[in-house]
Image (cartoon, helix red, strand yellow):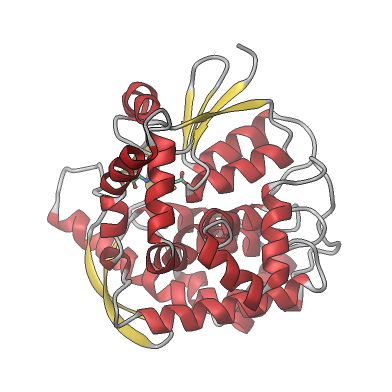
Amino acid sequence: MSHYQFIAAPFSLYSGKARGYLRWKNVPYLEVLSTREVYEQEVMPRLGYGMVPIIITPQNETVQDTTDIIDYFEAKLPGPGVYPAGPVQKLAALILELFGDEWLLITAMHYRWAYNEDFAYQEFGNTGFPHLPAEERYALGKKAAENFKGSLPFLGITPKSIPAIEKVYEEFLRAFDAHLAAHPFLFGSRPSIGDFGFLGPLYAHNYRDPESGKIMERVAPRVADWARRTHAPQQALSGEFLGEDQVPATLEPLLAIFAREHLPVLQDSIADLQKWVADNPGQSELPRITGFHKYKVGGVEDDRAVFPYPLWMLQRVLDHYAGLEGDDKAAADALLARIGASALSDMSITPRLKRENFKLVLA
Ligand SMILES: N[C@@H](CCC(=O)N[C@@H](CS)C(=O)NCC(=O)O)C(=O)O
């Protein structure tokens, strides 16, 4: 076997993120549908739990987590990459990857389950049980989807927060659409790690789910076009990042939404991690949820679970920032101040986190 296997699903958020990257990077891979059998016989034994997408290498190694998948191929394959060389561009790209993966997720989950419930059940059924008749596929798909639909309140998606989620999402779509009037991708003509972070929620859910796709086409047709182009690049390894480490001014409204909506959640998550560590001496493996907190979306307060995993992604941002010096640091600080994210410069994840054997653990 000389190709990579990519176990994934068409309707899966993080599969969309990785697939767009694999195509742009020209990775020789074959996609394997994560049917129930594949999930039970390949995914679960390899990870110790169920999660897609995964990569199986020709040497039979497993790579999970889309960020690890991207980093694996960035290190392994020659040619252009998705991390900008410009230090301020890279900082902004890492922030936007985190924001896409972990905050736009809220919009992806809300719109799927509010407007595409039947379609989603069909998709779960078609993927999990493709050999069964349509009715059985639907029934089993509905059952398989229970946990996902059931996660909405944990993500802070309730009747109270929904109008605010929709308001912020439309603000985000308009700002991204305006940016795309001037640039094909976030940082120029080459997709970056930030574009792929956006792609999961914006392609697999918010573009591909039929009712959500109509909303995207109506509010932000350039974003729909970007989702198509980024998920199915016409030319692998193409394009350039903007010169002189430019972060276009049109990205600042997007970064400001991160600072306003996501950063406070991350600050609470650090505090909760520290509390969890104090309450659980001697334990290294983190649970999926460390607690609950009040969060705000579009100014509306609601309850939400606190997830430690996004702190592992935030740590990447903070590690990059910590390495900046001189003019680069001054330019980064000026950007953070303009977007309202100066708090980032004093944040640190203590204790540090790492991923080991597909688990999040204290470093
Ligand atoms: N951070 C992970 C997230 C992957 C993820 O949540 N995948 C979803 C499907 S899109 C899944 O398999 N979820 C199963 C679960 O959460 O139990 C990544 O980037 O790969």
| Foreground of the two, 140 or 32 | 140
| Foreground of the two, 8 or 347 | 8
Question: What is the total number of numbered labels drawn onto the structure image?
Answer: 0
Q: Is residue 350 visible?
A: yes
Q: Which quadrant holds the C terminus? A: top left
Residue at 73% of width from left, 43% of height from top? 81
Residue at 58% of width from left, 65% of height from top? 213
* Spot occupied by residue 8 in the image (x, y as percentages of width and height): 49, 36
* Spot occupied by residue 167 in the image (x, y as percentages of width and height): 49, 84
Lateral position of residue 215 relative to residue 135, left or right: right
- Residue 210 image-quadrant placement: bottom right
Residue at 64% of width from left, 19% of height from top? 3
Lateral position of residue 174 relative to residue 257, left or right: right
* Spot occupied by residue 355 in the image (x, y as percentages of width and height): 39, 40
Lateral position of residue 291 relative to residue 51, left or right: left
| Foreground of the two, 137 or 128 | 137
User: Looking at this rendering, what residue extends furthest in the top direction?
Assistant: 1
- Residue 296 image-quadrant placement: bottom left
Position of residue 250 relative to residue 109, above or below, is: below
* Spot occupied by residue 326 in the image (x, y as percentages of width and height): 71, 66
Position of residue 15 relative to residue 164, above or below, is: above
Residue at 71% of width from left, 65% of height from top? 328
